[in-house]
Amino acid sequence: MRETSTSSRCTSARCAASSAPARSPPSAVPGTGWWAPVPRPSLTRLTVRARAALGATLVVAVALVAAGFAVVAVLRGGLAENARLHAETTAREVAAGVVDVPVDEVAGMDALADDEPVQVVDAAGTVLGASRPLRGRAPVADFNRPADSGPRQPPATPSPEGRTGDDDGDDDGDDGDDGDDDDGGGDAGTTAPPEEPVEVDRNSVTETVPLPVDDDGEVTFREGRATGLQDFRLVAVQSVTRDRVPVTVYAGASLAEQEEAVSTVGNAMLTGLPVLLAVVGGVTWLVTRGALRPVEGIRREMAAIAAGTDLSRRVPEPATGDEIARLARTTNETLTALQAAVERQRRFVADASHELRSPIASLRTQLEVAAAHPRLLDLDGAVHDTVRLQDLAADLLLLARLDAGERPGDKRVALDALLREELAQRPADRVPVTVAEHRGSLPEVTGSRGQLARVLGNLLDNAQRHAEHGVRVGVRREGGQVVLEVADDGTGVPEAERERVFERFVRLDDARSRDDGGAGLGLAIARDVATRHGGTLTVGRAREGGALFTLRLPVAGP
């Protein structure tokens, strides 16, 4: 079916002008003659609560506007369809009644006595009948007209003269005029011509047509009573009268109910939308404020920690178990790690200062004595203190580089060859070193040759310091690792202290003098280097009864 509707239109220039966004007027820069754009506030300057409330309000507004348009469209379409069905029902009822009356009696049909706008129009546009609002009016529409079959002819009926002529003709035919009998002319006046079927389109066609109405919404064409135009759904249905005259029945149904319903719904939405948006914005603001209240507590506590020096303070952890609670837990864990790092740094500085004080004080004393009594200068002791001071400074520098994240090299190192070189440089060790033999060649490892040599030297120094009769070393392969073992026959390391020995400035032999012992950095450096090379360094009990240090490093790739 064909559907038409009226709509307002505008020219492209006017539409473009009306749809173009309004621009802020530029402001003049004093003394320059130039115009600068007016700065606009940025959303990033708003608080999280404001952005959340604004975002939620905008989302709800867009959703409600879209839903409102959809509801209005469905409502408008449904009411327009109801009006069309009502008009079509009326048109088909009138069309059914037209079939039973001749063309001259269409105007007197009972179906045209109602107040609804109905017209019956023939193919030529002549109004054959109309309901009360449209009587005496021209056709309300010109669509869906039947094809014009020419001027109407009155129905053929037998004439008395024809019958008399036929009787006379019959009498004359008895006298011998056979030609009239053969032509059948004597019966021409008594037989009606055959009627051809009239074809009409039984489908309905609908259009929207404006009609004048009064205050009550009734169609009227009287001057002074019409108050405006009202859209009607006009349905056209073709039919044919009893005397075979094709006609079109127009019936209309007002769309006032549709417009009133749409207007009511639109006004309700316009009234309720701001209230609903205000409620959504307010609720979002309150909920966001409640959710972010722990964040403000975390911020205040962090500001207090940053302003002071008390790293033992912790931020409050909400009991909600949500993302903010996990943030507070992670923040406290970070503060704990930071506190531990600061404590280690303080202890490191204190221990380093203490370790440096002894050789410096000893060296100063020797120099002062030598200055007063040159013959009493202990040159070997001064050299020993200087070497010890140099070694300690080197250890501190290496630890600082490791703490700074210095990455080991990527060179390939043969650990067994490195062990032989290190032992060759230690001819004056206190106790002999036994090297365990291994079969075949050992794979290489990847890393810094200098740092790995430092690990071997520290482990051998530690074993020499605690061994009684000898030190045993060996290198072998276990799966994808190269394993280096350094064992001594000393007193060993108690199981409870086997992790503590790898801490910085920790020495278990407190009874030993500092001149005989180390500074407590060798094992800490060895473990840090092993860890950065992707390996491990652990301590256990050797079969000789002393300590067994095991270094495991991954085999170098192909």
Image: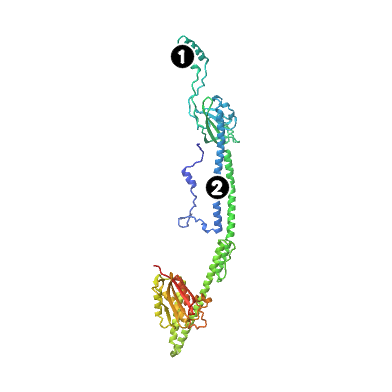
Judge whether residue 470 can be spotted in this image: yes
Q: How would you rate the neighbour count of disc 1 (Cα within 10 Å): few for under 14, some for 14-19, many for 20 or more?
A: few
Residue 320 falls in which quadrant of the image? bottom right
Mark 1 belongs to which amino acid?
Asp
From this view, report whether residue 17 is shown above or below residue 89. Answer: below
Mark 2 belongs to which amino acid?
Ala
Residue placed most toward the observer, 232 or 355: 355
Q: Mark 2 and 1 residues: CB-CB less than 8 Å, in contact?
A: no
Residue 429 x/y as whole percent: 43, 82
Residue 104 x/y as whole percent: 55, 24
Which residue occupies the extreme right position in the image?
A: 216
Residue placed most toward the observer, 8 or 150: 150
- Name the residue: 55% across, 59% down: 48
First of labels 2, 1 by sequence position: 2
From this view, report whether residue 232 is shown above or below residue 547. Answer: above
Residue 90 x/y as whole percent: 57, 33
Q: How far is the residue under mark 2 from the one under mark 1?
A: 85 Å
From this view, report whether residue 201 is shown above or below residue 390. Answer: above
Looking at the rendered structure, the secondary structure element under dot 2 is: helix
Which residue occupies the extreme top position in the image?
A: 175
According to the picture, the residue beneath numbered tag 1 turns out to be: 181
Q: Work out which quarter of the rendered image holds the C terminus and state it.
A: bottom left
Residue placed most toward the observer, 398 or 524: 524
**Rendering colour mode:** rainbow
Looking at the rendered structure, the secondary structure element under dot 1 is: helix
According to the picture, the residue beneath numbered tag 2 turns out to be: 67
Q: How would you rate the neighbour count of disc 2 (Cα within 10 Å): few for under 14, some for 14-19, many for 20 or more?
A: few
Residue 529 falls in which quadrant of the image? bottom left
Disc ID at residue 367? none
Residue placed most toward the observer, 200 or 57: 200
